[in-house]
């Protein structure tokens, strides 16, 4: 199926491993990011205080001023298959509606990758948050799942010429502490169908059911109802995603929000088999609570 899908022309050789996965224990987290620091500083402190390495956070409410973000854009440098717009800085900042942040590290220090929606200049916008340059002026509610023994590590990627998150298990032993769930940290490479790759990872790792959280890009999004976002550069946030058992194994269902290069926001359920990753897709799969013994 992947060979028949739309393909972006990335500059480097294709990596052999197309679906990167790390199994990990997860803890559920919730709380607030306080006003007064950048989003990145607040998230780093939130994870550090709880002894967490990496995971996913859902950000809701609150405000930032300044607020900085970018949109997806076509590449003009002759190297990258897609790129980003110039930085957008709304006057008066922005009020966050909802964001999904994948949390890990870059150059040895905490880092995050966040796509979301917010209100700026009286209009709902969507894009890629710049967390180092966005300063919290009102607290933001957060919830999610995180690991003490795995994270997403940003490293240079020869295939795409971007620096991108990949899941990484940590070798150092972590103190024994309670965990809530089992899960998978995933990175999907270009041209892989998003739903199909998630299902393949679940088969490989014995996951029959899970919540799906994540963000990424798709080369021309196709929805289940036939609508199409005819744009090779997009930013995606999964608003609701689940893995469930089907007649032939795990099936991934993904309801997403999409922003294109013009800033138009689209929503819908992805059509399985017709949504190839553009540059990358980063995911956290969270298995259900284990059943209590009878």
Image (cartoon, grey):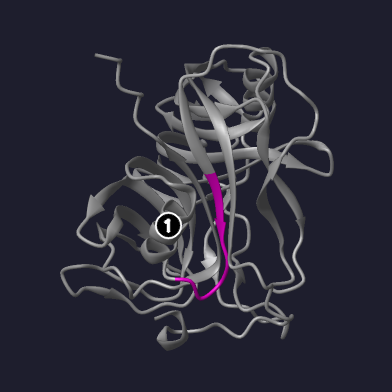
Q: Position of residue 210 (x, y in %)?
A: 35, 40
At x 32%, y 54%, the residue is 256
Q: Quadrant of the C terminus?
A: top left
| Viewer-nearest residue: 158 or 293 | 293
Can you give x and y, in whole percent of width and height, for residue 265 in the image?
A: 33, 59
The x, y position of residue 37, in whole percent, is 67, 22
Identify whether 263 is placed above or below 254: below
Seen at 55% across and 71% down, the residue is 73
Residue found 45% across the figure and 31% down from its top: 59
Position above or below: 187 against 273: above
Q: Decide whether residue 202 is among the magenta residues.
A: no
Q: Nearer the viewer, residue 203 or 214?
A: 203
Q: Is residue 25 left or right of residue 247?
A: right
In this view, which residue lies farthest toward the front?
294
Assign the N terminus to one quadrant of the image.
bottom left
Q: How many marks?
A: 1
Q: Secondary structure at mark 1?
A: helix
Q: Position of residue 101 (x, y in %)?
A: 53, 39
Q: Is residue 252 above or below residue 65?
A: below
Magenta region, residue range: 185-192
State the image quarter where residue 14 is shown: bottom right
**Mark 1 — residue?**
198
Residue 133 can be seen, yes or no: no
Residue visible at 75% across and 65% down in the picture: 157
The answer to whether any part of residue 143 appears in the image is yes
Quarter where residue 227 is shown: bottom left
Q: Nearer the viewer, residue 131 or 50?
A: 50
């Amino acid at each position: 199926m992947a060979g028949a899908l739309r393909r972006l022309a990335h500059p480097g050789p294709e990596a052999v491993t197309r679906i990167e996965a790390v199994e990990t224990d997860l803890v559920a987290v919730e709380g607030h990011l306080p006003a007064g620091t950048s989003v990145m500083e607040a998230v780093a402190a939130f994870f550090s205080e709880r002894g967490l390495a990496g995971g996913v956070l859902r950000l809701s409410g609150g405000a930032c001023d300044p607020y900085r973000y970018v949109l997806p854009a076509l590449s003009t440098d002759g190297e990258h298959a897609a790129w980003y717009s110039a930085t957008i800085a709304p006057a008066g900042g922005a009020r966050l509606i909802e964001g999904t942040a994948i949390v890990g590290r870059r150059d040895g220090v905490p880092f995050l990758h966040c796509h979301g929606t917010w209100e700026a200049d009286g209009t709902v916008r969507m894009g890629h948050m710049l967390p180092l340059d966005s300063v919290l002026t009102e607290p933001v509610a957060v919830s999610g799942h995180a690991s003490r023994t795995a994270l997403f590590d940003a490293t240079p990627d020869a295939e795409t010429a971007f620096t991108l998150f990949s899941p990484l298990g940590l070798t150092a032993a972590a103190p024994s502490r309670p965990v809530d769930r089992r899960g998978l940290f995933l990175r999907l490479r270009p041209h892989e169908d998003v739903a199909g790759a998630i299902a393949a990872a679940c088969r490989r790792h014995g996951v029959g059911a899970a919540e799906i959280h994540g963000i990424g890009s798709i080369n021309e999004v196709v929805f289940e109802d036939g609508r199409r976002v005819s744009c090779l550069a997009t930013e995606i946030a999964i608003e609701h995603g689940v893995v469930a058992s089907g007649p032939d194994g795990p099936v991934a269902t993904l309801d997403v929000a999409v922003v294109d290069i013009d800033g138009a926001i689209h929503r819908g359920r992805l059509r399985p088999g017709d949504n190839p990753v553009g540059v990358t897709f980063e995911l956290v799969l969270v298995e259900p609570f284990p059943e209590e013994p009878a």
